[in-house]
Amino acid sequence: MFAKRGAGVSAPQFKTTVHANGVAEIVIDRPPVNALNAAGWHALAAEIAARGDSPEVRVLLIRAEGRGFCAGVDIKELNADPSLIVSLNAGNYATFQAVHRNRVPVIAAVHGFVLGGGIGLCGAADIVIAADDASFGLPEVDRGAMGGAAHLQRMFGVQKTRYLFFTGDMIGAAEALRLGAVERVVARAALRDEALAVAAKIAAKSPAMIRIAKEALNGIEDGDLEAKYRWEQGFTLQAYLSPDSVETRKAFVEKREAKF
């Protein structure tokens, strides 16, 4: 096996290990909440795509260390430099596309909070395995942004997606399992082992057949996930022109209620 650290402005934001059975394990690790900055999203996209293109890789597993799986984008970075929205949008798009269109199956193993870009990763993945403490949400409205509903809707139904998007409410692992949004729920301590076991089961099969199956399954999906997400991103740029969007970001950084 070998490891690679993810690129970042101040510190590595993920690491990769390729196991002997062909499972590539990518671990997001950017304390305190695994909210990646613009450079981190671009680096993660490149890493996911490159691993899927590698002949030695048969399955990708994406998980995280720390308090939760992923809190999305670094709002503090964005508040300091709003012009980064274009780069962040591009990095998010590239990452979710790299997962969804990857040549090999991608498993997301999640725990704690799964927010924003974390939803994008799960919604783009082939299989989601959740710890019993996982909770899913898309608080984009409360952050003055749009995006991610296309991926949330790939996990949940239309009505549940709209409820979660409009309210910013969270949904727990047990309810996500009941609604078919995740494959299974396991104890937090067993999450990595369970995900690696599922990955190993797939990795033991014919790599050629699995790659063909991945392409075939993507081809029979309803609609174009990337086109839907790109449509949403246009509204993110529109939202950022609003004073309310500025206020939501400032309120988040200053840890206070937004005032409209």
Image (spheres, helix red, strand yellow):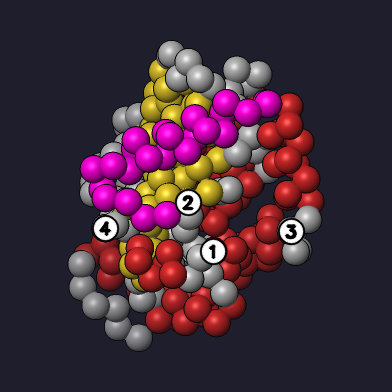
In three-dimensional space, the C-alpha distance between marks 3 and 2, rounded to whole angstroms, equals 17 Å
> Disc 2, disc 1: CB below 8 Å?
yes
In three-dimensional space, the C-alpha distance between marks 4 and 1, rounded to whole angstroms, equals 18 Å
Indicate which disc residue 133 carries: 4
Helix, strand or loop status at disc 2: strand
The answer to whether 126 appears left or right of 207 in the picture is left
In three-dimensional space, the C-alpha distance between marks 3 and 1, rounded to whole angstroms, equals 13 Å
Q: For mark 2, what is the residue?
A: 128
Identity of the residue drawn at 59% across and 43% down: 99
Seen in the picture, residue 206 relative to 77 is either above or below; the reply is: above
Instruction: Please rate how many residues cluster around mark 1, counting C-alpha atoms within 10 Å: few if below 14, some from 14 to 19, many from 20.
Output: many
Helix, strand or loop status at disc 4: loop
In three-dimensional space, the C-alpha distance between marks 2 and 4, rounded to whole angstroms, equals 14 Å
Q: Amino acid at mark 4?
A: Asp
Q: Quick check: can you spot residue 63?
A: no
Q: Earlier in the sequence, mark 2 or mark 4?
A: 2
The residue segment tinted magenta is: 184-207
> Disc 2, disc 4: CB below 8 Å?
no
Instruction: Please rate how many residues cluster around mark 2, counting C-alpha atoms within 10 Å: few if below 14, some from 14 to 19, many from 20.
Output: many
Identity of the residue drawn at 51% across and 65% down: 180
Seen in the picture, residue 31 relative to 78 is either above or below; the reply is: above
In three-dimensional space, the C-alpha distance between marks 4 and 3, rounded to whole angstroms, equals 30 Å
Helix, strand or loop status at disc 1: helix
Indicate which disc residue 212 carries: none
Identity of the residue drawn at 42% across and 33% down: 196
> Disc 4, disc 1: CB below 8 Å?
no
The answer to whether residue 26 is magenta is no
In three-dimensional space, the C-alpha distance between marks 2 and 1, rounded to whole angstroms, equals 9 Å
Helix, strand or loop status at disc 3: loop
Q: For mark 1, what is the residue?
A: 155
